[in-house]
Amino acid sequence: MRSIFSLLLIAVLVTVLTAQEHSEHIMLEKKTHAAAQEKDPKLPAGDEGAKAVLEKSSRHAEWVDIKYNGGQHPIKTFVVYPERKDKAPVVIVIHEIYGLTDWIRAVADQLAADGYIAVAPDLISGIGPGGGGTESVPSRDEVVRLIRSLTPDHVATQLNAVREYAVKLPAANGKSATVGYCWGGSRSFESAAHVKGLNAAIVYYGSSPDSTTLTKVQAPVLGLYGGDDARVNATIEPAAAMLKKLGKQFEYEIYEGAGHGFLRAQSGRDGANMRATQKAWPRMLEFLKKHL
């Protein structure tokens, strides 16, 4: 009888201890997840935290409509101002193929926190349902389709208009750069050739332009790439070789283990995307400070 009782007691104790251990494990996971979600004030938010960043930001932000020659609709543009006494350089934030999302706006907010007037245009303004832009499109796939329909000349015209508007803002000091992501990264590289008066261009994991465009590059370019992104990275060395031959400035860094879109998907690839973000953002700021 005693041995049966002892066995029952042991079974109960094991059950209680297992349940307690499981509970503690869940609590630890929650704490770890919460810690991962805390935003480093020196870095932009990842996709998951973008909306919260926008809601909490103390910086002045506004929507403006930028008209331009040949455009049937103005370019709806999100502008965020830094909190500083003197005039600031302008950084034009060129969105991904997913359009002007909360994440892109949060990136603009971080650039403003770093001292720049951040200007993020919606490049499908006017071609969405009812003449709207990204916000009017019902699905991501449709946004992608609309962005793929944009011609290089049309995008260059829009970006020139955005820069011309931005550098004339009373708080701007006349210097300007572009920074773009994925599809926008490619457009940023092209801007070094096609946007007049640009002082610098930053490319986050965007393919390099063709040789004709590369011969027209005027502004210094910085490329920031994930190591596990062979499609894009295959275009780096040919561009670097050609620009070096032409005497043009092109610097780049490749972050081992990081994937395409690492700045948005910071929690991905077992920490490699976050490590890339922690290196790429300060590297970009160093480049901007040098040229702006």
Image (cartoon, rainbow, N blue to C red):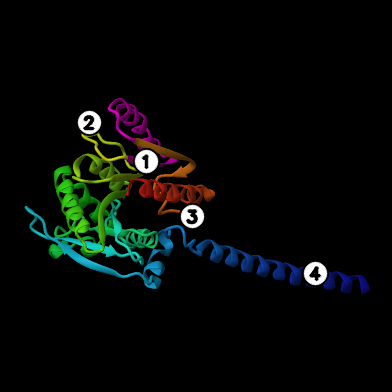
List the residue tagged with mark 3.
267
Numbered label attached to residue 223: 1
Toward which corner of the image does residue 22 lie, by quadrant?
Answer: bottom right
Left or right: 278 as drawn, with respect to 111? right
Q: Residue 99 appears at what percent x and percent y?
A: 27, 56
Query: For mark 4, what is the residue?
Result: 11
Q: Nearer the viewer, mark 4 or mark 2?
A: 2
Front residue of 101 and 145? 101
In magenta stretch: residue 228: yes
Q: Secondary structure at mark 3?
A: loop
The residue closer to the viewer here, 64 or 256, is 64
Q: Secondary structure at mark 1?
A: strand
Q: Nearer the viewer, mark 1 or mark 4?
A: 1
Element at label 4: helix
Residue 24 circle label: none
Corner quadrant of residue 80 = bottom left
Q: Earlier in the sequence, mark 4 or mark 2?
A: 4
In this picture, residue 45 sits left or right of residue 203: right
Could you tell me the amino acid type at mark 4? Answer: Ala
Q: Residue at x 27, y 51 (%)?
A: 176
Q: Which mark is residue 215?
A: 2
Dot 1 or dot 3, earlier in sequence: 1
- Foreground pick, 144 / 80: 80
Q: In the rendered image, is residue 55 in sight?
A: yes
Q: Is residue 104 above or below residue 151?
A: below
Amino acid under disc 1? Gly
Whole-Å distance between the Cαs marked 3 and 2? 38 Å
